[in-house]
Image (cartoon, coloured by chain):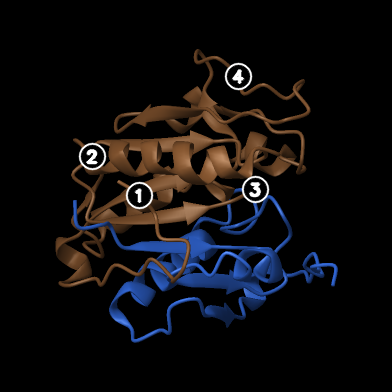
Chain colours: A blue, B brown
């Protein structure tokens, strides 16, 4: 096989960055367990998923995590930090 | 298939999202209600994965995972496994299709080498064989 392009949606960007994902989206401030948004926020969920898929067609740097703000989420949760 | 440990295993995407079939692979512990739950009793974690069919209804899915609060996923599985969201994107023509199969695994294990060299490759092969996916969305818990 030649491989399959992937996009990660992560709510733990520091943790995910250690694995250097080929493409990744961090919806800023979303809590763990809310990768796409809150339950039944379908329009927001669609926006996050569209944005993640759009990274396939953009010249992102492999290993880089793209941070995007989604005010409709309505909350900010501090992501987990990697202990150094 | 093996996965490089030295560099980012970047597969270029060529084409058009509107012609792309998309699969979901989640480490959020998602599985069908009638599949064996992930083993949350074993301190070493669970290296297994579950195949989720294309025609799954979101009400048939559940989460077994003890390292994140999945109460929101219990209410709406799409917050970690966006199967209905993907169907919406197909309906609006943003993507071409939803893949023939998807994968859930628990993503909590102390057996990192076995996960990296075993489970991850098995999941990649599952997607490669018969899912028809051109691209994969990965989510965690």
| Chain letter of the residue beneath label 3 in the structure image | B
CA distance for labels 3 and 2:
23 Å
CA distance for labels 1 and 4:
27 Å
Could you tell me which secondary element the residue under label 4 belongs to? loop
Q: Is residue B134 above or below residue A48?
A: above
Mark toward the start of the polypeptide (1 vs 4): 1
- Could you tell me which residue is drawn at 78 percent across and 28 percent down? B43
- From the viewer's perspective, is A48 left or right of B16? right
Camera-nearest residue between B53 and B41 = B41
Could you tell me which secondary element the residue under label 2 belongs to? loop
- Could you tell me which residue is drawn at 61 percent across and 76 percent down? A70
Q: Is residue A19 above or below residue B141?
A: below
CA distance for labels 4 and 2:
23 Å
- Could you tell me which residue is drawn at 42 percent across and 64 percent down? A7
Mark 2 surroundings: few (<14), some (14-19) or many (≥20) residues within 10 A = some
Please tell me if label 4 and label 3 are on a single chain: yes
CA distance for labels 4 and 3:
16 Å
Question: Which residue is disc 2 drawn over?
Answer: B131
Residue extending furthest toward the right:
A83
Quadrant for the C terminus of chain A, please.
Answer: bottom right
Mark toward the start of the polypeptide (4 vs 3): 4
Could you say which disc has been placed on residue B37 in the image? Answer: 4
Which x, y percent locates residue A10? 59, 63
| Chain letter of the residue beneath label 4 in the structure image | B
Q: From where the camera sits, is residue B77 visible?
A: no
Mark 1 surroundings: few (<14), some (14-19) or many (≥20) residues within 10 A = few
Contact check, label 4 and label 3, Cβ < 8 Å: no
| Total tally of numbered discs in the picture | 4
Question: Which residue is disc 3 drawn over?
Answer: B141
Question: Which residue is disc 1 drawn over?
Answer: B2
Camera-nearest residue between B125 and B72 = B125
């Amino acid at each position: 096989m030649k491989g399959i392009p992937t996009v990660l949606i992560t709510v733990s960007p520091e943790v995910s960055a250690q694995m250097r994902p080929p493409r990744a989206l961090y919806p800023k401030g979303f809590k763990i367990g809310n990768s796409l948004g809150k339950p039944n926020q379908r329009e927001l969920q669609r926006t996050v998923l569209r944005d993640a898929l759009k990274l396939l067609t953009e010249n992102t740097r492999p290993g880089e995590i793209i941070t995007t703000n989604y005010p409709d989420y309505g909350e900010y949760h501090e992501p987990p930090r990697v202990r150094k | 298939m093996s996965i490089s440990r030295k560099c980012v295993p970047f597969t270029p995407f060529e084409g058009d999202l509107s012609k792309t079939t998309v699969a979901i692979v989640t480490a959020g512990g998602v599985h069908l209600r009638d599949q064996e739950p992930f083993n949350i009793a074993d301190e070493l974690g669970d290296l297994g994965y579950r195949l989720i069919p294309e025609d799954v209804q979101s009400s048939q899915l559940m989460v077994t995972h003890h390292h994140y609060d999945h109460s929101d996923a219990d209410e709406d599985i799409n917050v970690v496994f966006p199967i209905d969201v993907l169907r919406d994107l197909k309906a609006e023509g943003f993507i071409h299709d939803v893949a023939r199969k998807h994968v859930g695994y628990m993503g909590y294990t102390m057996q990192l080498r076995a996960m990296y060299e075993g489970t991850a490759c098995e999941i990649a092969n599952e997607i490669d064989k018969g899912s028809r996916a051109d691209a994969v969305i990965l989510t965690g818990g």
